[in-house]
Amino acid sequence: MSERPKKIVLAYSGGLDTSVILTWLKETYNCPIVAYAADVGQGDEIDGIREKAKKTGADEVIIDDLREEFVRDFVWPALRANAVYESTYLLGTSLARPIIARGQVEAARKTGADSVCHGSTGKGNDQVRFELAYMALEPSLTIIAPWRIWQFRGREDLMEYARSKDIPVPVSKEKPYSSDRNLLHISFEGGILEETWNEPPEDMFVLSVSPEKAPDRATYMEIKFKEGDPVSVDGQEMSPAELLAHLNEVGGKNGIGRVDMVENRYVGMKSRGVYETPGGTILRIAHMAMESITVDREVLHIRDGLVPKYAEMVYYGYWFSPEREMLQAMIDKAQKTVNGLVRLKLYKGNCIVVGRKSESSLYHPGFATFEEDAVYNQKDAEGFIRLSGLRLKIARLLEQSRKSRE
């Protein structure tokens, strides 16, 4: 760092790491610290955060309610893409980081801060996500990443420092893992979960019951889509945040959305993550069902071929990149016809599509029937198949000719 910072905006959660970082920043740089807390659906974790930040040394505290923006401008675009990383992870943390970073940059502009700081470790993905967003949005800001420069080497060092400075320690021996929550999901990693053979303890889960304890009677629901975005559940229109929160509750009660995976981090190592994403799981299944009758075959196939790349961009931290925005424009164009209703059956961890209908449907029973119809002449299939297989036929004929000459 070429010059000492004059004012720092810290992405503050109130957890162990950022609580220690706040005090450490004051001691290290002796400048005003703005604690920036973004509410993206952490629930009661946000309660008392202003008082805690002030007590820990913050000169100013900014709390932003970003729940509606988060779902509308980050979760819904990813849903329109059916984005999933490594076929499993619905990108809950990956989508939350860019909106937090954006709010942090805006806070720096408002308060006249010249530096921003995050609490991500030097081993994880979040450091990349935060810093790529900072650079894309306000390249003049100095970035401070304490985990890469201070003397602490692990959580035990932080807990010892916190005790010496009378900082409340939110991590206990009874729950030896870390978690991150927002409206899309809650994630768990580290501690006992680092051993890939260990089954996650049942009392760890927050948003869902186990499938074994889910109701014995199925729950039916109908979700309405407009241009790829969900707009109502069972006829009740809701805001984006309200709708996702509602589906989290209903899905969680039915044991839906649990994932236990070992993923490949951007920085090069494998990491085990356990996730609960009830509402997101329901919506992705419903959205794909809606697309199945409203999107042209070739458009759907091209888009589906790009989903892994889109998800990778988001996971790696390139939300504010031109390539993600380009793909998003293409994806959103394909969503103009994704309008209609999907009926779902939720039962003991399963989300099953049992109906779909749309005024813009490309499906017509009269065309798909095995009975006589007016648009398809079965004799046409003969020429279609001959031309489709012509290259295969020619290749084999030439091969047989070469062999006969040997």
Image (spheres, grey):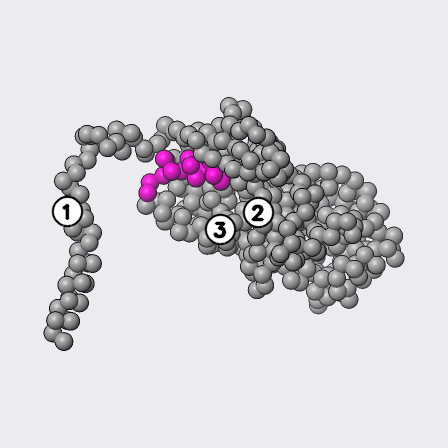
Q: Is residue 40 left or right of residue 27?
A: left
Sequence-first tag of 3 and 1: 3
Q: Residues within 10 Å of mark 2 (few under 14, many from 20)?
A: some
Q: Is residue 372 left or right of residue 328?
A: left
* Distance from Cα at disc 3 to Cα at disc 1: 38 Å
Where is residue 360? Give x, y as percent.
Answer: 36, 31
Q: Which residue is mark 2?
A: 259
Picture disc at residue 366: none
Q: Which residue is located at x 15 percent, y 45 percent?
A: 382
Q: Secondary structure at mark 2?
A: strand
| Most frequent secondary structure within the magenta stretch | helix
For this rendering, which residue is in front, 249 or 235?
Answer: 249
For this rendering, which residue is in front, 17 or 280?
Answer: 280
Picture disc at residue 87: 3
Q: Is residue 313 left or right of residue 113?
A: left
Q: Secondary structure at mark 3?
A: loop
Where is residue 58? Give x, y as percent.
Answer: 80, 49
